[in-house]
Image (cartoon, rainbow, N blue to C red):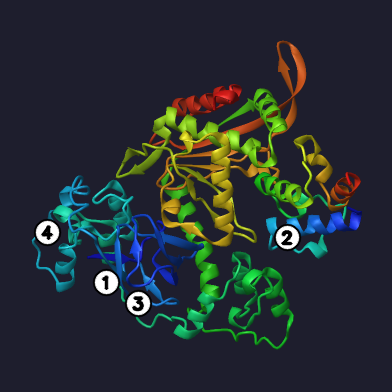
Amino acid sequence: MADFLMPALGADMDEGTLLEWLVKPGDEVHKGEVIAVVDTDKAAIEVESFAPGTIERLIVNPGETIPVGTLLATIAEPMAGQVAGKKQRAAGKKAAAAGKPMTPRKARRERTAEPAEPAHLEAGSPLVRHLAEELGVDLERVHGTGHGGAITRADVTLAAATPAPQPGKPTPPRTAAAALARQRVTPIARRLAAELGVDLSGVTGSGPDGAVREADVRRAAEIPAVPRQAPRPAGAVSPAQARLLATRQVTARLMARSKREIPHYYLSDTIDLTRAMAWMHDRNRELAVTERIVPAALLLKAAAVAALRVPALNGFWLDDQFSPGGRVHLGVAISLRGGGLVTPAVHDAADLPPLELMNRLRDLVTRARAGRLRGSELTDATITVTNLGDQGVELVYGVIYPPQVALVGFGKVVERPVAVDGMVGVRPVVVATLAADHRATDGFTGARFLTTMSDLLQRPEEM
Amino acid sequence: MNTQQATQAIEEVLGQVAPDADLSALAPDADLRDSLELDSLDFLSFIEGLSKRVGQRIDEDEYQKLATLASASAFIAGRG
């Protein structure tokens, strides 16, 4: 039997609200299948099963807010030991804490064939050490429940959650929270409701399936009958206000940490897109609109391939050293309507043709805005791209997402006078920037990355 | 298709691409991309949806004619 725990879906996530179960006891699930929807500070996230098996028991009810690492459900495995061995490596010296007296709960988990953590995160991996550092957990004191006593991320989050039982923490009444969970609310409406102090449970939705939309919230806010909440004593805020605050705080903490810890260096290059744009227009002219691509698809593809060719920029800075990301999971900064930012990853972006890459991105954008991202998409990015050019700016210098070591920025594709062979002509260009971690690489490597991208964009047909 | 039908079709598709947008507040000659904060992918989705909705092929060279609600309505209506 395996335990399905509330996962940490971001470096700064402490707790989550179970919104919805997509399975019921007795259902067969595959590894990687989405089985639950969890609301975090940032968005509703689809959480995948880490193991195949049969859902045995659902322990947490929709609407409940619980700390990371709390048991959500148990999954009976089809064949015990089927997946054994895989996670044995990299147990880590510190995991040798095994042999301590075990609580009954830990003893039970010790026997499980699969460590209770998402499969894409390796036991005892640098990511585990990183998470421990993040949460201020001393690994010496953590009991590993993975194979060979390896410490898993779940162990770390559990350890972080256990000593703080959060006394007197204001939790929303179960019934109200459960009603909220059933109610379909667009992310912007949710945020607006928090801003305006509108109680969503009293709002009737006018969208598809009765979804509450921005306009509904605005309408509700105008009705004077909605009692404005009296000022609360310091330290006690409504769940909605807390949520809004938390959204900002997640970004605030992460970005402050980035600027505090990462010695950024910045490079930029103006890339001539004459060939890329001509190739794209030729291609699009012949094709149905569903097969057409936009310049962003070529830019993202070039960034992904360049990350593959300059691997020193693709990965993480952990424990004072660079840990290569291996494959390129391209994080893309997506702004949510009405505010907020998420950076989900397009998996194996370097291997995808531009059209496929673009369609994956469209899918990500749609789901990000609908609040339906998957856990693995939020945690896997090895390098991130911000494409603010679509919003009209010519140049963007990004802030690196820790623990990544590079962030690529694209400005707007603009026509500019360019001197070529002693003649001035008007050409489409884009300013590409790189913000990189000077601990991991030097400017020389960064320059190679930008020139690689530029070279790739001169041969668009090969991408 | 007359201009009014075209406008209706366009608003319908915009409503799908940007479900949170308040289309009633959209000025006929306002740039759609700016007013509705559509990025290039959103705009492509708009073209795709509109093409399907009105049963007309829309080429890339013609995107500029779809910049505003007024110009887009005129363009779609003008093609029958």
Tag 3–tag 2 contact (CB < 8 Å)? no
Mark 3 and mark 2: span between their CA atoms?
44 Å
Relative to A250, does residue A302 appear above or below in the rendering? above
Q: Secondary structure at mark 2?
A: helix
Relative to A35, does residue A131 appear above or below in the rendering? above
Residue A244, given in percent of the width and then of the height, sits at: 55, 68
| Of callouts 4 and 1, the N-terminal one | 4
Badge 3: chain ID? A
Q: Secondary structure at mark 3?
A: loop
Identify the residue position indicated by label 3 in the image. A166
Mark 4 and mark 3: span between their CA atoms?
28 Å
Please give the name of the residue rendered at 54% of the width and 40% of the height, measured from the top-left corner: A357
Badge 2: chain ID? B
Identify the residue position indicated by label 2 in the image. B15
Q: Residues within 10 Å of mark 3 (few under 14, many from 20)?
A: few
Tag 2–tag 1 contact (CB < 8 Å)? no
* Pick the front one: A173 or A264: A173
Tag 4–tag 3 contact (CB < 8 Å)? no
Identify the residue position indicated by label 1 in the image. A163
Amino acid type of the residue tagged 3 in the rendering: Gln
Identify the residue position indicated by label 4 in the image. A98
Q: Quadrant of the N terminus of chain A?
A: bottom left
Q: Quadrant of the C terminus of chain A?
A: top right
Of labels 2 and 4, the one closer to you: 2
Q: Left or right: where does residue A384 sit relative to residue A288?
A: left
